[in-house]
Image (cartoon, rainbow, N blue to C red):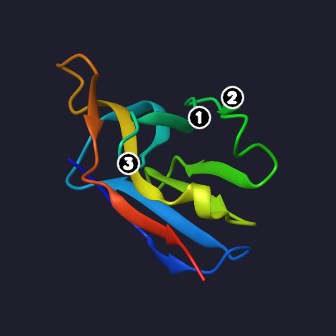
Amino acid sequence: QLQASGGGLVQPGGSLRLSCAPSGSIFSINDMGWYRQAPGNQRELVAAITSDGRINYADSVEGRFTISRDNAQNTMYLQMNSLKSEDTAVYYCYADIQSSRYFRARGYWGKGTQVTVSS
């Protein structure tokens, strides 16, 4: 399973850092990403990172958010700066995980962490 943390309430212009890591032992992690879902909206991709470090951002967060991963710790981060009210959403992490060398990789979702940007 995946566990995400770091959400909270922040004022416009502020920053937050989200973290995501699997609980338990795994064999390897391929692609990872952050998604978000605001009330009444569909879940959307925020940023994604491959195992070799290729990164993709949504246009709405380009230049403000930074995705990174620590492969040794199997952890992914999302540094969010210059937050806006429209960034308010539940943020979910996703990872394509191979739990054992004997099994194929499959996708896992974290439970989500609430980010609220409000004065």
* Residue corresponding to mark 3: 92
In the image, 113: left or right of 18? left
Where is residue 99 shown, x and y percent of the image? 22, 33
Q: How many labels does the image show?
A: 3
Where is residue 35 shown, x and y percent of the image? 46, 41
Q: What residue type is labelled 2?
A: Arg
Query: Residue drawn 26% across and 41% down?
Result: 26
Q: Which amino acid does label 1 sit on?
A: Ile
Query: Residue drawn 76% across and 55% down?
Result: 64
Q: Which of marks 1 and 3 is in front?
A: 3
* Residue corresponding to mark 2: 54
Q: Which amino acid does label 3 sit on?
A: Tyr
- If you read the primary sequence from the N terminus, does the residue marked by circle 1 or circle 3 appear first? 1
**Regarding mark 1 in the picture, which secondary structure is present there?**
strand
Category of crowding for the residue at label 1, using alpha-carbon neighbours closer than 10 angstroms: few (below 14), some (14–19), many (at least 20): many
* Residue corresponding to mark 1: 49
